[in-house]
Image (cartoon, rainbow, N blue to C red):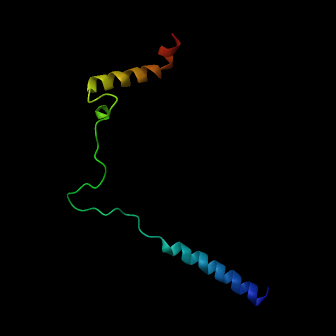
Amino acid sequence: MSTKTFVIGLSAALGLVLAGCGEQPQVARYEQGTYQGKADNPPWDGPAFNGDKAAWERAVRERTRGQNEYVRVE
């Protein structure tokens, strides 16, 4: 093994080791008392149901009924 090959291999190994040390923390900054995310709206508030909770519940029941194999086979 030549000295040049050893130095290149050592440099590559050192570069890989140092690359693992550069990770930055990925923690969200939180300010006390404030919510910085997206506001949550009820699912029936969308344009499909225009705030009609009963219609949304009926649609969910029908969708669930359509996924039941015992009811679909009739």
Quarter occupied by the N terminus? bottom right
Residue under the point 28% across and 62% down: 30
Q: Look at 32% across and 32% down and name the residue there.
A: 47
Where residue 70 appears, as percent x and y from the top left, is 49, 16
- In the image, residue 8 above or below residue 28: below
Specify the quadrant of the image occupied by residue 40.
Answer: top left
Q: Nearer the viewer, residue 48 or 9?
A: 48
Q: Is 50 displayed left or right of 22 in the figure? A: left
- Farthest left residue? 33
Q: Residue at x 28, y 34 (%)?
A: 45
Which residue, as the protein is rendered here, is positioned at the far front? 47
Residue 26 in the image: above or below residue 13: above
Q: Position of residue 5 (x, y in %)?
A: 75, 84
Percent position of residue 13, x then y:
64, 78
Where's residue 50, x and y in %? 28, 29
Q: Quadrant of residue 56?
A: top left
Q: Identify the residue at image location x=70%, y=86%.
A: 7
Nearer to me, 27 or 54:
54
